[in-house]
Image (tube, rainbow, N blue to C red):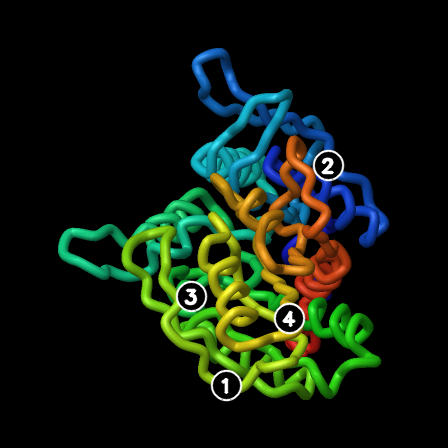
Amino acid sequence: MIAHGKDIKVITGNSNPALARDICKELGIPLANSEVGCFSDGENFVSIYETVRGSDVFVVQSTCSFVKDGKLSTVNDSLMELLIIIDALKRASAGRITAVIPYFGYARQDRKTKPRDPISAKLVANLITTAGADRVLTMDLHANQIQGFFDIPVDNMLGSPIFVDYFNRKFKDDHEDTMVVSPDVGSVARARAFAQKLNMPLAIVDKRRQKANSSEVMNIIGDVRDKRVILLDDMVDTGGSLCHAAKALVDIGGAKDVTACATHGILSGPAIQRIQDSVLDEVVFLNTIPAKPEVHCDKIRYISVAHLFAEAISHIYMETSVSPLFV
């Protein structure tokens, strides 16, 4: 007996409506009829044009920047839209509200690294909970401990199974000469699990970060000479670390070629041009953050996460275990 809601409804903000539509297509339901916009002074508003009373509602909204009607909106706009949608649903007597956040912004500010630093990830978790969300469904949080910042259930999906399927097909004829590389020491656990699933050896790029959005490659731990290399990370922002690591793997390590993959393609500032000019053969992202509409780069490829999120939504609605999706 499902006691929390009579039906599934999916509603979206403006940050990633294409993904929300694809999720609905996988679920075989229409996207909820709603409008999310802003007034002339920039204040956000939401209008929901159908009843949600008693429904199990899933709000699909990545907290990333986005472009709508030729205007660039910020991470803060996405976050504010999410909070207002949740509040509107709560006040409309939705049975249960799940915030589906494929990319969770502010996740890099998960601890104090120097005096008087904020812990913004905790603040955002508090805002989402206070707005009225009953649970959160997200993917590849930058730091796993962020799950503990919430006082509501959190399902942190993994993007690696999608990449495992992709690279098993891509390198099936050259599997023995392919290695997984962690771009830094902090990502070793993620890269090790990924390498085990692919049954490939692991190497590590040891780097020293001098300041935010910049890094210096210091050393390569492992033998990558004449190997095809897969660089794995959870996100790519300005692209500096990724491109420097790829260059070091080729120039210092002697790698034959380098392919990279990351769950979240933030791609701010010079990132796209850096990737285009780099030694990277291909960079594969999941569409947790939509592709930049104004720039084309033939090295960048996107894979959809709609099927995985639709499966998770189905499990949550039916109140069955989500664990099989983490394999």
Can see residue 258? yes
- Residue at 45 percent of width and 19 percent of height: 42
Sequence order check: which comes first, mark 2 or mark 3?
2
Gap between marks 3 and 4, in whole Å? 15 Å
- Residue at 82 percent of width and 53 percent of height: 26
Q: Amino acid at mark 1?
A: Gly
311 on left or right of 95:
right
* Residue 158 x/y as whole percent: 61, 68
Which type of secondary structure does the marked residue at label 1 adopt?
loop
Callout in the foreground (1, 2): 1
- Location of the C terminus by quadrant is bottom right
Callout in the foreground (2, 4): 4
Residue hosting label 2: 32
The dot on residue 160 is 4
Q: Marks 4 and 1: CB-CB under 8 Å?
A: no
Q: In the image, is residue 168 above or below residue 307?
A: below
The dot on residue 222 is 1
* Residue 302 x/y as whole percent: 71, 52
Sequence order check: which comes first, mark 3 or mark 4?
3
* Residue 108 x/y as whole percent: 38, 56
At label 4, counting other C-alpha atoms closer than 10 Å, the crowd grade (few under 14, some 14-19, many 20 or more) is many
Residue hosting label 3: 143
Which type of secondary structure does the marked residue at label 2 adopt?
loop
Which type of secondary structure does the marked residue at label 3 adopt?
loop
Callout in the foreground (4, 1): 1
Q: Amino acid at mark 4?
A: Ser
Gap between marks 2 and 3, in whole Å? 32 Å
